[in-house]
Amino acid sequence: MTKEMHPNNRGLIKWIIIIVLLLFINFYQLPYYFTIPGDAKILTEFIEVEDGNKHEGTFMLTTVRIGRANVVNYVWALFSDERELVPEDQIRREGETDEEYQHRQLMMMTSSQDLAVFVAYNHAGETAYFENKGVYVTAVVPDMDAEGKLEMGDRIVAVDGEEVFEASKLLDLLADYSVGENVTLTIEREEEISDVSIELMYFPSDLDPSGERGGIGIAQPVTDRTLIHEPHISIDTNQIGGPSAGLMFTLEIYNQLTEEDITEGYHIAGTGTIDEDGIVGRIGGVKQKVIASHHAGADFFFAPNERGSDISNYAVALETAESINTDMEIVPIDSFEEALEFLNNLK
């Protein structure tokens, strides 16, 4: 004899299924991040050169908001002109924790600021130079011998007793060792010095598909260096991370160091990394940054030109500007000097 389910029970089960599906859709994280336009912020809010000059125009820092994609965000991004999906491995390194990712982003921001000060001060005839102090560990590769021996934030100051002050020197010294050999690193951690013995191993296939490259197991070591400069400058970007504001930092700092307003009263947004030679490099999220700058009322947007590449940030920025029908002019930039040249021609 069979019994029919009570209508109330059927309704309860239906609602339980709906709730479980809603929880799954909202909380199950896919191996993607989504990006959306952030803000275009006036850089005088973040940067102040001691006794610096005030000007009418503005340079703007552009940002992108980023988050882990659930099912809803994934589908939304597929049909959105402003959202983009980025595979997880293009954002986070394998095994990287939230803390390590944030630390890496903030370290890149600090380096970007130092490079901007260095380039701007030297162009303006002010004092700025670097003193190298060692090599920072920014991430440890899982399952290599450094795991458990080195930590994010350690500073390597010697290899088998030979002093190391920059990342290139560390890599040159390690190149003399073979897989299976041990090397003694002198490290500084929380103001304490210690020696650590590490065996060189082959890098995993995701970092080296050839399977032929060996190392101690740290990813992208960064030179720890102090910038010596005069006059004093204050830069406070809160928790904004990454290196992509380098060009705009450099322009704002230079503008505060000079009596002439190089903006000519315009509102100028943009993006791009900067190196010691003033070369502008590629960044991510340029589409979202163009949209943010348009909403902020920028007159111009500086985008890395990558020497005229067909897939450059500039090409994407130009396409985006056309799609949103903005009056903002997209300007291709390969160097700080090229940006200055464009601004000088605005007179």
Image (tube, rainbow, N blue to C red):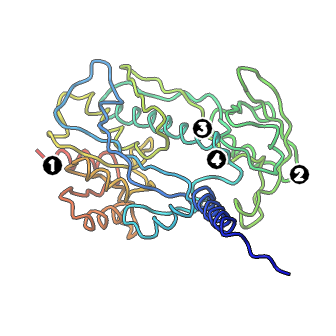
| Percent x, y of residue 307 | 37, 62
Residue at horizontal 34 percent and vertical 42 percent from the top: 61
Drawn side of residue 324 relative to residue 106, left or right: left
Image: 38 above or below 23:
above
Point out which mark residue 345 bears. Answer: 1
Q: Residues within 10 Å of mark 4 (few under 14, many from 20)?
A: few
Q: Which residue is mark 4?
A: 220
What separation in Å lies between label 3 and label 1 (alpha carbons)?
Answer: 40 Å
SS for dot 1:
loop
SS for dot 2:
loop
Residue at horizontal 80 percent and vertical 43 percent from the top: 146
What separation in Å lies between label 1 and label 2 (alpha carbons)?
Answer: 59 Å
What separation in Å lies between label 3 and label 4 (alpha carbons)?
Answer: 13 Å
**Rendered-image quadrant of the C terminus:** top left
| Percent x, y of residue 48 | 33, 25
Name the front one of labels 1 and 4: 4
Q: Earlier in the sequence, mark 3 or mark 4?
A: 3
What separation in Å lies between label 2 and label 3 (alpha carbons)?
Answer: 31 Å
Image: 262 above or below 295:
above
* Front residue (pair 262, 67): 67
Residue at horizontal 64 percent and vertical 39 percent from the top: 99
Point out which mark residue 180 bears. Answer: 2
Indicate the amino acid at tag 1.
Asn
What separation in Å lies between label 1 and label 4 (alpha carbons)?
Answer: 39 Å
Q: Which residue is mark 3?
A: 103
* Front residue (pair 76, 97): 76
Image: 33 above or below 197:
below
Indicate the amino acid at tag 3.
His
Indicate the amino acid at tag 2.
Gly
Drawn side of residue 304 relative to residue 99, left or right: left
**Rendered-image quadrant of the N terminus:** bottom right
